[in-house]
Amino acid sequence: MNRLLILPVLLLTLLVGTPAYSADFQKGLTAARSGDYATALREWTPLAEQGDADAQYNLGVMYAEGKGVPQDYKTAVKWNRLAAKQGNALAQYNLGNMYANGQGVTQDYKEAAKWWRLSAKQGDAEAQYNLGMTYDKGYGVTQDYKEALKWYRLSAEQGNAEAQNSLGGMYGLGQGVTQDYKEALKWYRLSAEQGHASAQNNLGVMYGLGHGVLQDNVYALMWANIAASNGDAKGGKVRDIIAKLMTPDQIAEAQKRARECVRKKYKGC
């Protein structure tokens, strides 16, 4: 079963941790939260120049997103790199993304994997997922399904829906692990319950084929309908294939269950 490949994107958020920061840092944080990025820039720049890793990370966010300053990926890379070298996991993750996307630097998956690994080892779930993907697809590293499985699992166990879907795919295909449809179903379901459209489609396929669960076209169509409504192109194709095997009453029942499942926010469907 093919699964959706999500290339790494630049996901940047302002630091909102709870450590005791200086008054200047807190003033910048308060300003940023209220949308006053000019004040945040004024407060954080001197701190960043003095070596404050959190201020450096936040400046990297501002320059990457163009908040309070013209968008400037090269300057974003500069500040993220300084913070990343001090061990800031979020900066390491973001720097990996920038190398993967060629933002402010020449695209380099090997360098991206280097920074994601440092962040992943600190427990960052997004970095763990991205590192798993690099091993899964052989981006910047030698393809290694067992290593991919390791990082996907660490991320999935933290609740990352992308990783849960990918981990389900590896169990379904037997990549890096003994093929196990029930385990695949388990991870697809966890991801689907978070609204992950590809996982919802994968869950529908599992019901349609009877892999890890009793074959049931009604549930297969239900999940395919939900996946399609959430933007998964494969869901529409699966929906059309399954519907041809069903009676009008069965199709109506699947549509009814899909509506109920959406109302329940995909839980317990």
Image (tube, grey):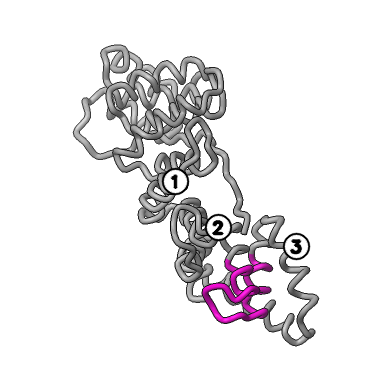
Residue at horizontal 46 percent and vertical 28 percent from the top:
112
Vertically, is 35 above or below 226?
A: above
Q: Is residue 63 left or right of residue 255?
A: left
Q: Is residue 2 visible?
A: yes
- Which quadrant of the rendered structure holds the N terminus? bottom right
Residue 148 image label = 1
- How far apart are the two marked residues, 3 and 2, measured between alpha carbons? 17 Å
Read off the residue under disc 2. Answer: 196
In percent of width and height, residue 212 lies at 52, 74
Whether tag 3 and tag 2 are in contact, CB under 8 A, the answer is no
User: Magenta stretch: residue 221 in it?
Assistant: yes
**Relative height, residue 190 to residue 147 (above, below):** below
- Residues drawn in magenta: 203-226
At which x and y percent is residue 72?
53, 17
Q: From the viewer's perspective, is residue 72 above or below residue 28?
A: above
Using the image as rendered, state which of residue 251 and residue 134 is in the foreground: 134
Query: Quick check: is 225 in the magenta stretch?
Result: yes
Would you name the residue on which mark 3 appears?
Answer: 237
Of the residues tagged 3 and 2, which is closer to the observer? 3
Residue 206 position by quadrant: bottom right
**Among numbered discs 3 and 2, the one appearing first in the sequence:** 2
